[in-house]
Image: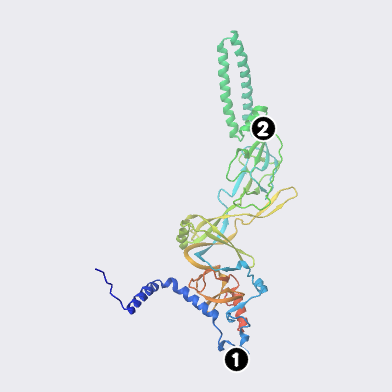
Amino acid sequence: MKLRIPDLPLKLIGWLVAIAILVPAFAYRGSWFPGTEGWVKRTIGVYRQPGPATEQGHGTDGKDGGHAHEGHSGHDDATSLELSEQALGNLGLTSDYIQPVKLTTYRRSITVPAVITERPGRTRLQVATPMTGVIRHVHAVAGEAVKPGTLLFEIRLTHEDLVLAQTSFLQTLGELDVERREIVRLTEATKTGAIPRVKLLEREYASEKLEALLSAQQEALRLHGLSTEQVEQIAATRRLLRELQVFAPSPDEHSENELKLARRQVQPVVFQPAAKLPNPAGDAAPLVISELRVHKGQSVDAGETLCTLSDYSKLNVEGLAFEQDAGSIAAAAQRQWTVRAVFEEPNNQRQTLDDLPIIRLSNEIDTVSRTLHFYVALPNWIESKTESEDGRYFVGWRYRPGQRLQLEVPIEEWPNEIVLPVESVTKEGAEFYAFQQNGDHFDRVAVHVKYRDQSTVVIANDGTLFPGDVVAWRCAHQMQMALKNKSGGGVDPHAGHNH
């Protein structure tokens, strides 16, 4: 027996197919309708032929009407602008500022004042003498750039404890040598039976006591600042060390060679910069002698500061946020969002530095200003360098403690947005316009601005502009004025500007 499917009317089948197509299309209309509508409008605008009303009042016989387009079919002169190479150069519309639109993630930010500060315990390094003495020579020069390990000072020691420690060490060495020679003599005599063996044992015990005392004295010399090599040198030469050499320390590492006791003269080593300026991630940055406190012939006590070195390769930025913004900044730090630093420069120019991490937030609110202090890491680099006649180098860092700036801290994230520089749009009345490149012309396009601040503008992704469309990233206001001049309309010099 065969199953028989009842025949359906063709009209009913057509309705079922239409419903199957229209229902999903209506359900997902938000994802395809705006883009399709914008594409249709743009296509109609490109191929629309001007009617009599757009022919500047001329007849429709074509004798005068062709004048309006000047041979540029597909462009509406009221909304299209042709720029020569010279005009593009005057506006600064280089290839860097004529770029395609792309979707990106935009982070809405708040702006807070800030100031560059030193890193506590890292930026400044104080160089002090561990012993009393007289400054014999000063190799350091205020403001000079030096590397760790550079000789800074030579000091003639008058430290009584060190002199006594070295003297006792040499005395013990001498006594130990005598005991060892006596042990050798007694060893030969006891073999023949001329001397009892107990005498040899007494000398061996005395030698062991001297060796223990010598070990203690060696440790005492190391506590005074001598290295193992220097203690061995005293033992080998049997002469006291009378001169202290002080070298530039390392900010992150400690070496016993930062203090050296020696008798010989040494030549100072100055900083020799590389062919290119160092960067924060490169070789060890030079230290700047920011303060010099001693001079040749000056007597110094143990623990007295000789000079101060500054490491400006890494600094901090101290942000001063309002109390009500504390939660937003704490959330940004928790999400590991980075901060943008904005520096004001001459001629109303702004220099920015992106991707700066938030280090920490203060656990207290300033009782006077009612602000929350938070700190951002700031890398630094050498901007200039000069060499003196005697071969010393002086450097200038890009950022300096005390310099003021602004921080843009992200507080909200919007994915899949069209983000452009604020100079890429201009405002006229209630409309915002961008200029899209179309061949050798720039077409004015009305856009919906969702948000804008001092540097960026967020344009709605509603199909007016598509990812890949090439637009002018700057000078939209000047292009709008040129468009109005071409059409004969009056120009408002303040249009598109915020005061």
Q: Quadrant of the N terminus?
A: bottom left
Q: Residue 499 at x, y = what percent?
A: 57, 74
The residue most toward the right is 389
Say which of marks 1 and 2 sits in front.
1
- Judging depth in this view, the residue of 106 and 334 nearest the camera is 106
Distance from disc 1 to disc 2, alpha carbons, whole Å, reads: 111 Å
Residue name at image x 60 percent, y 72 percent: 475
Give the quarter of the image for residue 91.
Answer: bottom right
Examine the rendered structure and indicate whether residue 155 appears above or below residue 78.
above
**How many numbered marks does the figure carry?**
2
496 relative position to 16: left or right: right
Residue 241, disc = 2
Residue name at image x 42 percent, y 72 percent: 30
The residue most toward the front is 1
Residue name at image x 61 percent, y 78 percent: 81
What secondary structure is marked by label 1? loop
- Judging depth in this view, the residue of 239 and 136 nearest the camera is 239
Examine the rendered structure and indicate whether residue 59 appears above or below residue 372.
below
Residue under pointer 1: 61
Residue name at image x 65 percent, y 37 percent: 260
- Judging depth in this view, the residue of 106 and 268 nearest the camera is 106
Q: Residue 346 at x, y = what percent?
A: 64, 65
